Amino acid sequence: MKKLSVKIAGAFVAVAFAVTASSASALTTQELINLLVSAGLVSADQVAALTGDSTTTSGTASASACGPFTRDLTVGSTGSDVTTLQTFLEENGYLTIPAGVAKGYFGSLTASALSSYQAANGVSPAVGYFGPITKASVATKCNPNPVVTTPGSPGSPGSTTLKGGAGSLYYTLLSKFNNEEVGEEEEDVEVLGIDVEADGSDVALKAVKIVFTQGTATNDDFDDFADEVSVWLDGEEVARVDADEFDEDNDWTDTVVINSDAIIDEDDEVELVVAVSGASNIDSNDKGDTWTADITSVRFMDAQGALISEDPGTATRTFSFEGFATASDVELRLSEGDEDINDTQLLVVDATADTDNQEVLSFMLEARGDSDIEIKSIPVSFTFNGVNVVDASTTAYLMVDGDTVATENLSAAAATETITFDDIDYVIDAGDEVEFVVVVDLQSIADGIANGDTLTVAVTDVDDIEAEDEAGDDVIDTDASGSANSDAHILSQYGVTVAQESQNFNFIGDSTSSGTFTLAFDVTAKGEKVYIDKTAGTAATNGIQYILDGATPEVSSENITSTASTEGGEWVIPAGQTKRFTLSVTVDNTSVNAAPAAGYYQVVLAGVQVDDASDNSGEVDIDVTAFDVETTSKYIADTE
């Protein structure tokens, strides 16, 4: 105590002239102490040791840091209330007092810190003057229960006790954030992150200083690109500010105050992440421009109450602002759907009446990326062979899950017509795939369809599909791909479908033997009773047509049998019934015929000629390859 008294006595001499020169009114003891503190002749801690005033100590926060404030404060003000204000600003991350400088004097440093606080908390004007509006703001935020308690003592009700001694933090840049894309209206895109480890103490994060720097961007208004900046600790939001806090006047820098519950326990590692939300309408000239993000200061308090600000020293991360589609990786993918619909069908038509609700094309639309896609319109082409569009069909429907989403008329007096299903307005959720089915009403034989006419349906020009992403932007051509086509569907009053039952081959073992292919298949009559010529061969006029594929094969014989009954020298299958057919083709490997070369051979069932009468006219030729009838087993001929 004696030592301090001597120092104070000496200090009076040092400031005597200043006191005498302004002695219009006598100085109070507190004012004199404030002068000594501001002159650096004594420290605030020394004054506290002499006076017992805990508000000036720097080790432990106390309830007096919340005021009360009984007067306005501005540059030049001194006193314990200035110290209280400085402590408040310090604990909330706005003020860092250089080492050796005592509290108690309101200087330019305090004014700048107060201005930052005012700007961050909606106090206007944010000029660094501590008046009634700012007092009210501080009163709503000041916590009379201190966060930091003396080590070993219990925290006061509602407070968090930091445990440990002197604390420090270790930082590592997170590699997973690099070259991120922030899209229009896209919220909280993580652009920069550091791993933070607490050592020696629990710590309470108080503030982080974030700096954004122009990269390729020529527009220097950060808030033209971004709407908000947020800070996250292990996935929990701990701070959020408007992007206009980062402007050219402060070099796109802002000290963001962290929520009071941002605690890192001793020896824990957490991820401290900066996220950016895109502006609602980024100018087209600004899309693709880059910025860099950096955390240049982290302010925290340890269990001893020490407030520490330090630069993590980690690198910057570059990110870009993009249109919504680019940032969300929007892509519309078109592909073929149900094979039972797209593979060749026998579409049975009536002699005089329409045949409705025939499914002729199935296709899938997938919304790839992170955005829903709304389908607005889809063009579909119809190609008839043997009849004009208007004579074959008048109406087409687009269906999803059995519901009609669009209807269009067919009217072309030509073989081909492309219609556009408009006003679909069907939303495909991001990542989902939806099946669309095209359905037609077919007209009759009397309207102009002839037995054996065909219909092919396709969505070939995917670029003409009109679709929008969540932002309301069109899905551009480069973000749309794929196609969908049906096989040629057969239009007829009658016909057959074919299904394979079995296949076999008797291997040719030497140059004096022969091998036989055997293929069994089922034939089902559709529409009406059908007749099939009893011949089998490679010619298109045969009732059962096949192809022998290989290196100059020699067929010695072929045979066809069936469970079908015969009528007029032809097999007959009543409407709706199925009959079994067995085709046998023998390849000779003897010297009697020209021996086939060694190699692979196979028999392919190619077609069936059907008729509605037993007159051997063969009016409708069914391409059997459309029914997925497999070839018989391959073999190797041995000609040695």
Image: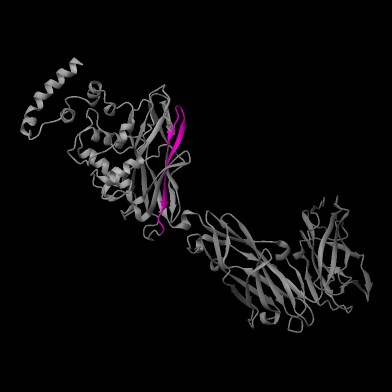
User: Is residue 269 inside the magenta stretch?
Assistant: yes
Indicate the quadrant where residue 513 lies: bottom right
Q: Is residue 256 visible?
A: no
Q: Position of residue 295 (x, y in %)?
A: 36, 40
Colour logic: one colour
Residue that protrudes farthest toward the top in the picture: 2
Q: Residue at x 94, y 74 (%)?
A: 567
Q: Nearer the viewer, residue 597 or 346?
A: 346
Q: For residue 81, say whether it is visible.
A: yes
Name above or below for residue 19 compared with residue 70: above
Please provide percent x and percent y for residue 64: 31, 32
- Residue at (30%, 48%) from the top-left corner? 123
Please state the horizontal and vertical placement of residue 481, each as a whole percent of the image: 56, 61
Q: Is residue 431 magenta?
A: no
In this rendering, is residue 116 above or below 391? above
Residue 263, image x, y percentages: 43, 33
Quarter containing the N terminus: top left
Tell me the chief SS of the magenta region.
strand
- Residue drawn at 30 percent across, 37 percent down: 89
Please state if 400 lies on the left or on the right of 566 as rendered.
Answer: left
Q: Is residue 540 above or below residue 181?
A: below
Q: Dividing the picture into quarters, in which one does residue 345 lie? A: bottom right
Q: Nearer the viewer, residue 563 or 37?
A: 37
Q: Is residue 95 left or right of residue 477?
A: left
Residue in front for this viewpoint, 470 or 74: 74
**Residue span colored magenta:** 261-280
